[in-house]
Amino acid sequence: MSDKVMVMYLGRTMEMADSKPLTTGPRHPYSQALIASVPIPDPVLERARKRPVLEGELPSPLRPPSGCVFRTRCPKAQAICTEIRPPMTDADNGHMVACHFEEKQEMLVFAR
Ligand code: SF4
């Protein structure tokens, strides 16, 4: 449907990339949780895969958290995430990510 995908949380861009690298190897923890929530239409693969689960409530967009707006629900959050808003950086050939601790996570997705 689209060549590029932008993932947003509380009105801020978390990740932006071509659709294939973003859906098969998301780098932001929020993108990873979103992609992992897509069901795989194969019961064996679906049962076998691990899913990151987001804890907590969605904060009010009127009073977003300081630093990284995703920090109250992020399993990787550290002290720096409270103080400093992560800049959008080029993690890999135009794959833009706003996270102090971004890392690629290979996702099990159903080929389309
Ligand atoms: S900057 Fe920190 S809180 Fe925000 S997504 Fe990255 S690890 Fe999580």
Image (spheres, rainbow, N blue to C red):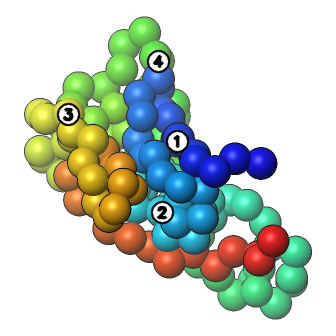
Residue kind at label 4, given as amino acid type: Ser
Q: CA distance from mark 4 to mark 3?
A: 17 Å
Observer-side mark, 3 or 1, equals: 1
First of labels 4, 1 by sequence position: 1
Residue at image location 40% in from the left, 61% down from the top: 27
Residue kind at label 2, given as amino acid type: Pro
Observer-side mark, 4 or 3, equals: 3
Q: CA distance from mark 2 to mark 1?
A: 10 Å
Observer-side mark, 4 or 1, equals: 1
Residue kind at label 3, given as amino acid type: Arg
Secondary-structure class at tag 1: strand
Residue at image location 63% in from the left, 51% down from the top: 3
Secondary-structure class at tag 2: loop
Residue labelled with disc 3: 85
- Tell me, yes or no, whether the two marked residues, 3 and 1, touch with CB atoms within 8 Å: no
Tag of residue 26: 2
Residue at image location 46% in from the left, 16% down from the top: 61
